[in-house]
Image: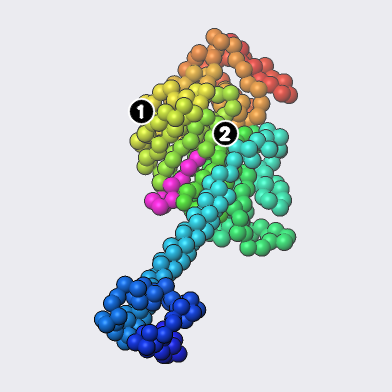
Amino acid sequence: MNLKEYFRLAGLFGKLNSQEKLEDDFTTTPEGETLRFFWESCEQEKINASSIIEKTRIKIREGEKKRRRNYLLITSVSIAASVLICISTIYFLNQTTIVDVDLQAIAEGMDSQAVDEVTLITAKEQLNLDEDAFIKYSKEGKVAVNSQVIKEEGEKARDEQEYNQLLVPSGKRARIELSDGTRLVVNSQSKVVYPRRFKGDIRKIYAQGEVFLEVAHDKKHPFIVESDGFNLRVLGTKFSISNYKGGTTNIVLVEGSVEVTDKNEKKAQLTPNDLLNIADGAITSQKRVDVAEYISWVDGIMLLNGNELSQIIQKLSIYYGISIQCDPSVGSEKVYGKLDLKDDIDEVIECIRQTLPFTIERSDTSIYLNK
């Protein structure tokens, strides 16, 4: 209540003792109803104008304070709710952008058997690389091949998640170091899809064919490998995946630990020297093995510890991109030793024939081993 209003009310109550007609004054005064209450409820001789005015002023002030508190409370809650909604919206939009990319759909766009050279596909171009090329990504997502930085036209800061794809044809191999320091060796007829640089809470790639991985340890950002029929989750470890189309999937753990989930949501925990088999997207078996036999291809060697010839030539067909078949009576024979995959296929077949007698029938597109 300001000073002007105070004196106006004081003058009004001053008329009480004179018994003047006050109807018009009460009607035109904003506080009229409050004053009327005091006037009608109190005996005239007990009326103290100064006391009533002071009490009225206090009541009005308390009402104003209460309204201010309510307004501030409602305003604060509204602002907090708006901020929370904005933060939540931004978070889920970012998660959708980073996490929900269909890597398999990207991989299906190209076939590793459709290229003749190691092929790197970026968002801007397609590069043909030499055999045993070493592709390295910096933390910022810049790429170098055999220590030579690849400059792309129109290159700018990459705020969005950009994915590259590596295709390795028959008879070739390639190595990659991802932006987090994870290293991959990619075998013949294989492909990998991966982000140019990792963003978000997880590190996720897609692999199909045969790939050896040495995952950089990062407890806060688990590493996930997606493939046909299964997902594999690790923090930091070394393992090999073999999942060529039409064949059984093998996952061999060298060190660390991994968790594999098949298409039926069945899970398996692997410890070093474990071999996990997956058929048609379902886990079928888990056993202990000598991992050297399963990862020797990384060094360009195939170790043979009593493997049947039919199994050996199946792998050689993939590595060299040529159809190799054998008579069943020969296919069941066991072979020991090692093969140098850097040699051409004729030299490799001849090396096997020195330990296991058979005849060789050769054409431009196929090899047949007979008794």
Q: Residues within 10 Å of mark 2 (few under 14, many from 20)?
A: many
How far separated are the C-alphas under marks 2 and 1?
22 Å
State the residue in front, 370 or 221.
Answer: 221
Q: Nearer the viewer, residue 287 or 27?
A: 27
What residue sits 66% from the left and 20% below the top? 367
Q: Are marks 2 and 1 in contact (CB under 8 Å)?
A: no
The colour style of the image is rainbow
In the rendering, at what x and y percent does residue 179 appear? 53, 54
Sequence-wise, which precedes: disc 2 or disc 1? 2
Image quadrant holding the C terminus, namely top right
* Residue 288: numbered disc: 1
Which residue in the structure is indicated by mark 2? 209
Image: magenta residue range: 217-225
Q: Is residue 259 above or below residue 357?
A: below
Q: Amino acid at mark 2?
A: Gly
Is residue 224 located in the magenta-colored stretch of the structure?
Answer: yes
In the picture, measured across the screen, residue 86 lies left or right of residue 3, that is right
Residue under the point 56% across and 60% down:
140
Residue 254 quadrant: top left
- Residue 231 seen in render: yes
State the image coordinates of residue 339 (x, y, percent, origin top left). 52, 30
